[in-house]
Amino acid sequence: MAEPKRIVLRGGKVRYRTVVDAGLDENGKRVQLTITRDTKKEVLAERARIEAGRSAGTLIVPNKITLGEWLDQWLEYKRRDVEETTIRTYRLALVHVYDQLGHIRLQELTEDDVRDFVDELVAAGRRRGGEKGTRLMVSTVEGVLTRLRGALSRAVVRKLVAVNVAAEVRPSLADKKTDKRERKQVKPWTVAEVQTFIRGIQQDRLFAPLLLSLMGLRPAEVCGVRWVDVDLEDGLLSINQTRTMIGNHRVLEKDTKTASGERVLPLPRGPWEALRVLRLQQAREKEAAGEAYTDTGYVAVNELGTPLNTRQLREYAYQMMADLKLRRVRLYDARHSVLKTLALSGVPDVILAAWAGHTNAAFTKRKYVSIEAEDMRGAAAALDVFHDDGQKAIV
């Protein structure tokens, strides 16, 4: 191997230089690095380090790719593994990253850069849904961080960077406490509110689809149910596909969100009977409409057979809530009410997760089962055993 070349700079300073093969870049192009040091010994040491790293597969080759450019590549890579709707969600989550950090070279991004970004995002990251420049929810910022960590982890695998500088960055404890204090969390309906809603919509033509939401189905699953998925003889409902929205304006028909989301549920008595009634009603509507009727095979349709999308179902439910003077909650939040009721009723964790379409029961309970004071009333009653004698003595 050639010895380092001795060079004399314009001012007379002597330095040593050599070129070393560093392997291939992302595009398979040969990369050569120029090493320039004050002494021959330093040049040889750096060359040895690069060659050793190349042999061990740990060498990080210098490159000029920016964080924004890498995020574009990462999103394209993720298309192999996730749905189109998920890619759109990822891109929206990374909007702030593109804007504030995207210009920084990937190899120059530091943990301090990411931490300062997170602090600023919490403090003044809101763009819509409120006054621009006001605080952003910590949970939203954590979602942004999750996507950024994923992209940087992939960069580590591809040996574009040595470490994931976002791995240990979190919103500050002070920000979490402020967020908890200032954010009013909308609570899912209580059992009594669910009962009021059911009683109030019994005569509505969409009674059955709305009851499916109150079985714990996601709105996209409700809109995706077809009559071929409904077994009215044995009372079974197969969930095989969804009809979701992209950007709240385009419908996408696709498989369930995950493999575990594809499931068969036994129908409770109420939805079972409501589906029987709806089946007969749609037959009458089809006969009355004649050629104007579009027979799509979906359960949640209008009077002419056109399938409802999640936005239409949501707005319809909101109107019903307003008419019944009930608290307005998202249809998706009905899922929380259902799964919490199942959990508090003693349904085994494995059944709870399967009903929700999850593989992990711990996740189901952590995300959907929040315990309120009234839920613990039975525990308080159990503790009355300590006070029974005292009460009798008072009487």
Image: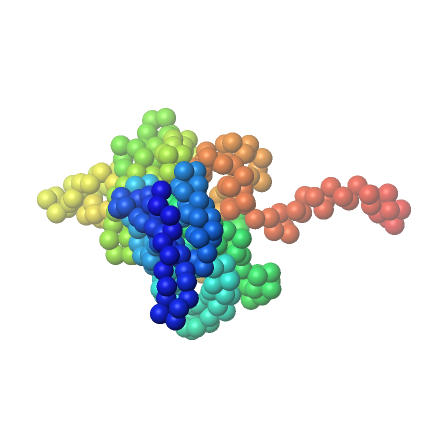
**How many labels, in total?**
0
Image coords of residue 13 (percent x, y): 42, 66
Identity of the residue drawn at 33% across and 41% down: 81
Q: Nearer the viewer, residue 99 or 33?
A: 33
Residue at 36% across / 60% down in the picture?
A: 7
- In the image, taking residue 181 as reference, residue 257 lies left or right, namely left
Return the residue nearer the eye: 221 or 122.
Answer: 122
Residue 278, image x and y in percent? 30, 40
| Image quadrant assignment for residue 132 | bottom left
Q: Is residue 273 visible?
A: no
Nearest the camera: 21 or 355? Answer: 21
**Residue at image location 37% in from the left, 66% down from the top:** 9
Q: Position of residue 276 (x, y in %)?
A: 32, 35
Residue 91 image-quadrant placement? bottom left
- Could you say where residue 245 lies in the image, as x and y percent from the top left? 29, 51
Residue projecting furthest to the left: 291
Q: Residue at x 32, y 29 (%)?
A: 231
The answer to whether residue 317 is above or below residue 273 is: below
Confirm whether residue 28 shows in the render. yes
Q: Nearer the viewer, residue 265 or 66?
A: 66
